[in-house]
Image (cartoon, rainbow, N blue to C red):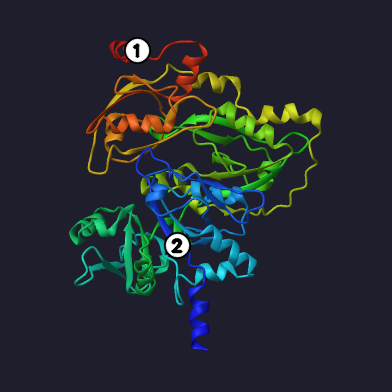
Amino acid sequence: MDIAEDAERVSDPLPRVCVLKREEGENFGFHLRVERGLPGHVIRNVETLGVAEKAGLRNGDRLLEVNELFVDDLGHGEVAHKIQVSGPQLCLLVLDGEEYEQAVAQGRDLRELASAQRGEGWKPPRLCHITRDPVTGLGFSILPVEGEKGKFTISPVTGGPAEKAGVRKGDRLIWIDGAMACELTHSAISKMVKKCSDHMTVLVIDSESEKCYIHRRMLILPAMADAQSMPYKPRRLHLEQGPDGYGFCLRQEKASAGRLVHVLRDVETDSPAELAGVKDGELLLEVNEESTEHLSHEDVVNLFRQSGQQVTITTMTLHGQDFCTKLGLSPLLFTEEHSPTKEQKVKPASPEQSAAVMKLVASPAEAQEKLQEEPNIRLCVLQRGTVGFGFHLGCIQQKPGTFVFQVTAGGPAESSGLLQGDVIVEVNGQNVEDECLEDVILLMKKGETTLSLLVVDRPGYECLKKNGKPITAEKVAKASEV
């Protein structure tokens, strides 16, 4: 009997944990596919010596979980979206292709198989946003764990702000205001707490659940966390066209640090937009789960046109986006489905009214003219810091130009004047406009400690290209002489 049980145990499929961490400008180095005749989400095109291969991902693996969330029963688009919004770190639970197919054929419960890796009593980490009380302060104390370097406990004052935010006695501190606690000294953490103004965000976990992650050699990431106390969350809204369209205007406006953002304006009373919950001044983050961050105004309008009579949008306040950016988090990690309080009672738009619909979506001509300012061409010289150059690259399929996807606050890139959304024209004097993202990254790595980038803002780049004007370093000198 024991022998039979042992044999069954040996034959159990064994999922693998793969922790991927990409550096600035890198991708994760694999493709996620759904293939005819093959069940599950299939891992393909694992790049040799890439991030995924180094983390243990293999061609043909099947994906079970993304950041501790079971995804085998989700659609391909939804799973891909969860990977895209994860940020530079990603935790995947996978099963070998053959073992996966055997498990499916045997009728095994894949969700149970995945959760068994965590053991009983496991609880997810928690993101706790603590607002300072004028009398009691933040209401917690942080102490180093004796004999364990880089580990700290955080204990809340009973009834204080930290406890109300979800911190529990004996919790382990994993992350504080965007910084990993294991990389900080107790003195540095104490200084951060003293300097904080009116709020602080921490990632915590109970000590028993932490042991589960240590045993599995997993990082504890904000993307895995219960984020109930987070003050700002994007909302996913579902709209249907009415006789007069959606009932709002879409404008492209300049926000902090010169960033261009897509803003929802002039929301009409009792329009489909208002009834769905759209608020004037909110940022448009996604259209049908496609990010608008690096798209032009015309590209976003086209997404609405292609959507037909219905559209799903993701919105957030500007304050909310700034809050997440300062913490180094993707706001899309915390998106919530929004159910409108009013019943949406609008007649669908007829084909003849489609043109009128887009008039409401598109920005007025005078607003677009304000955006056609002098192209912002800059030569940014970066010195590599302790954490690299401090930015990430991205690209849009079938559109020219590698662009700056993210700039790390306080890093070398920000200090040099590099801005999110900038298009990379030259790397160390070499034009890279027609180069693929991977070749641009390789060229940057050759620069070692110093990196020279000729960049221009996206609207300026498109304007110069449209008019056939070259983008050169000489234009930077001329601009500075004026």
Tell me if residue 116 can be seen.
yes
Q: Helix or strand or loop: what does disc 2 sit on? A: strand
Q: Is residue 358 left or right of residue 410?
A: right
- Say which of 34 and 324 sits in front: 34
Tell me if residue 64 can be seen.
no
Q: Which residue is mark 1?
A: 475
Q: Earlier in the sequence, mark 1 or mark 2?
A: 2
Q: Is residue 72 left or right of residue 378?
A: right
* Residue found at x 44% / y 53%: 57
User: Which of pointers 1 and 2 indicates the residue nearer the eye?
Assistant: 2
- Say which of 319 and 34 sits in front: 34
* Residue found at x 54% / y 63%: 99
The amino acid type, in three-letter code, at marker 2 is Arg
Q: Residue 16 — which label? A: 2
| Residue 170 screen position, x and y as percent | 32, 74
| Residue 334 screen position, x and y as percent | 50, 53
* Residue found at x 41% / y 65%: 125
Identify whether 275 is placed above or below 459.
below
Q: Residue furthest bottom?
A: 1
Q: Quadrant of residue 144?
A: bottom left
Q: Is residue 212 left or right of residue 114?
A: left
Circles 1 and 2 in contact, beta carbons < 8 Å? no
Q: Helix or strand or loop: what does disc 1 sit on? A: helix
- Say which of 217 and 245 sits in front: 217
| Residue 64 screen position, x and y as percent | 53, 60
Pointer 1: residues within 10 angstroms few (<14), some, or many (20+)?
A: some
The amino acid type, in three-letter code, at marker 1 is Lys
| Residue 116 screen position, x and y as percent | 49, 72
